[in-house]
Image (cartoon, rainbow, N blue to C red):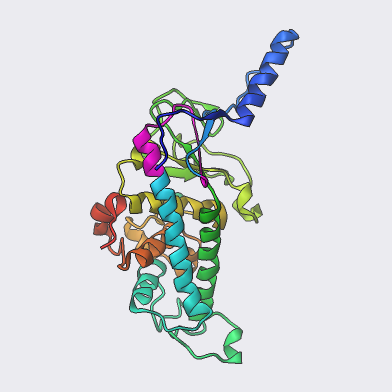
Amino acid sequence: MPDFSKDISIKKPTAALHDANLAIRGKLGLQVPTDPRRGFTDRMEALSHSVMIGYKNRPSAAEMAATVVACQLAGRVMKKVNDQFASVSFLRKSETQLMKDVLDAHFGLVEGDTAGGYLKDNVADKGFSLKSIKGKDRRWVIEKLRRNMLSLSFHLNTGIYLIDIDAARRDISGGQAVAAGSIKSTTEAYVGNVKDAKDPVTGRTTSWKAASDITCGFTRGEMHVSFKEMATYSPLSYARVIIHEATHKYLNTTDHGNDGYAHSAQYRTLSLTDCLKNADSHAWAAISLYAGAVKMKEQVDYWTDWKQCQKP
Ligand SMILES: [Zn+2]
C-alpha cells in the first residue's frame, strides 16, 4: 500500500482553468461571472497506477487505502467473472451449478422459462446448431452478459477515476449550489448525466443527454463515491459499489427507480429484459460468481451482504 502521509494531489485542470479565467477577468477589470456550474471537488490525486480520485477535502489515509483495495478487487472480480462467462460462451463448457443459481437469482433466468416468450427456448448447455443462431435463447443471454462483463473488466482493469461525494461539506451538487451539509450522507455512490434523472443527492432533476442518445460510456458522468461511507464497508461490498456504478457509466444501466436494487422486494419480480439493463443484477451476479456463492439471494441478505459481503 502506498504511503498516504504525503499529499501529492494536484489542482484539477478544470478548476485551474476556471480560477485562471476569473483571475484574468479580475486583472482586466472585466465582469467576473458567477459560474453556476462550478465544480465542488477541485483537487485530484493518483492513489496507484490505476486509481485516481477527485475531492475537495483530502480523504483520510484509511479511506484512501480502502479505495485502492476495493478498486483492485473490483478489477480481479471482473477478470474472473469474464473468464467464467467466456468458458460457457466461447469454450462451450457446461454451466456450473453456481452459474445457474446466479443467473436465476440475479437475472431471473430459470431453465425452461422463456421469460414470457421473450426467449425461443431456455436450455442449459444446448448443443450447437445452425438453427439456434437465429433468435434469442439462453446462450444469447449468456453471450450478452459475457460482453457486458468483458467491458466492465476492461474498464475496471485499465484505470478508475472516483470523485468523493463528501456529503458533510459538499455545497455543489449537479452544478447547483446547495447548503453545505444539507445533502444525504447515506448515499453510497452515483453516476450523473441522464436526462430527467433525479440527482440522488439533492433530489434535483438534471438535464443532460437522454439515456437513449448515449451510445458510449464516456458521455456518462464520472463515478461519485462516498469515501467516508465506503471505508466502513468490507472490500467485497465496496468493490460491488464500484462495479454497480461502472455498469451505469459503461453499460448505461439504470436502477429502475428503486426496484432495481437487490434489497428491494421488486428486484425479484424484474423481467429478464429489465435485468439485462439493471445495475445491481450485474454487480451482484459478478460478486456472487467471484465469491463462489449466491450473494443478495434474498431480500433479508441485505443485513449481511450489502455492507459486509464476505467471500466464504
Ligand atoms: Zn445505481
Side of 279 relative to 268 (left or right)? right
Position of 3 relative to 105 (above/below) = above
Query: Is 39 covered by the magenta stretch?
Result: no
Looking at the rendered structure, the number of numbered marks drawn on it comes to 0
Q: Nearer the viewer, residue 76 or 256?
A: 76
Q: Which residues are magenta?
A: 49-67
Position of residue 133 measured from the top left corner of the image (x, y, whole percent) = 60, 85
Q: Quadrant of residue 131?
A: bottom right
Q: Tell me which residue sits at (48%, 85%) in the image.
A: 121
Position of residue 25 measured from the top left corner of the image (x, y, whole percent) = 72, 14
Position of 253 relative to 118 (above/below) = above
Q: Tell me which residue sits at (42%, 40%) in the image.
A: 2
Position of residue 290 measured from the top left corner of the image (x, y, whole percent) = 37, 64
Q: Quadrant of the N terminus?
A: top left
Position of residue 208 measured from the top left corner of the image (x, y, whole percent) = 62, 42
Q: Quadrant of the C terminus?
A: bottom left
